[in-house]
Image (tube, rainbow, N blue to C red):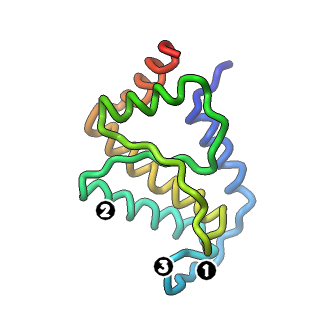
Amino acid sequence: MKLSRSAIVVAGLALVASGCQPTTATFNSTGTIGGNAATAREKGAREAKDAIAAGVLKLKEYPPLPSPAWQGKYIQLLKERCGVDYEVPQLPKGISEADFIEEIRGWNGVMEAEIKKKFGDDILQKLREEAQAKK
């Protein structure tokens, strides 16, 4: 059985997040979150909605995973066909890795929904398949 890159990312993120116990969220003076996966996910979703309102479409990948040979072509197709940027951000200081992963999940969930709304429910899969065929 051949798994897509996004299926592998989701499975990996689920494994990382499964060991996290939610606690009360705290916000420090820089606005970073500590200790609550649900709040981190909400923060990512909120920031993605703000980005969409500003006309920005961008998918994020964290943690960075080894890229298949076709990944560069997929990123290029995202940009050319849909105007979607792609980013592999660094873990910010003051945020736990588990919270940051949840923040990225929240961001990507909102962004993927917007991309599908604008370009069709199957656009991301079609672009992945096209990129794989053009390796």
Which residue, as the protein is rendered here, is positioned at the far right?
A: 19
Q: How many marks?
A: 3
Which percent across, then down, holds residue 59?
44, 45
Label 3 sits on a secondary structure element that is: loop
Quadrant holding the N terminus? top right
Q: Which residue is mark 3?
A: 31
| Residue neighbourhood size for the residue with mark 3, other residues' Cα within 10 Å, grouped as few (<14), some (14–19), many (≥20) | few
| Residue neighbourhood size for the residue with mark 1, other residues' Cα within 10 Å, grouped as few (<14), some (14–19), many (≥20) | few
Q: Which residue is mark 2?
A: 50
* Tag 2: amino acid: Asp
* Residue in view at x 38 percent, y 28 percent: 77
In this view, the residue in front, 13 or 87, is 87
Tell which circle, 3 or 1, labels the residue nearer the N-terminal end. 1
**Up-down relation of residue 128 to residue 82 (above or below):** above
Label 2 sits on a secondary structure element that is: helix
Which percent across, then down, holds residue 60?
49, 48
Q: Which residue is mark 1?
A: 24
* Tag 1: amino acid: Thr
In this view, the residue in front, 94 or 45, is 94
CA distance for labels 3 and 2 = 16 Å
Which residue, as the protein is rendered here, is positioned at the far top?
A: 133
Q: Contact (CB < 8 A) between labels 3 and 2?
A: no
Q: Contact (CB < 8 A) between labels 3 and 1?
A: no
Which percent across, then down, holds residue 49?
33, 59
CA distance for labels 3 and 1 = 15 Å
Tell which circle, 3 or 2, labels the residue nearer the N-terminal end. 3
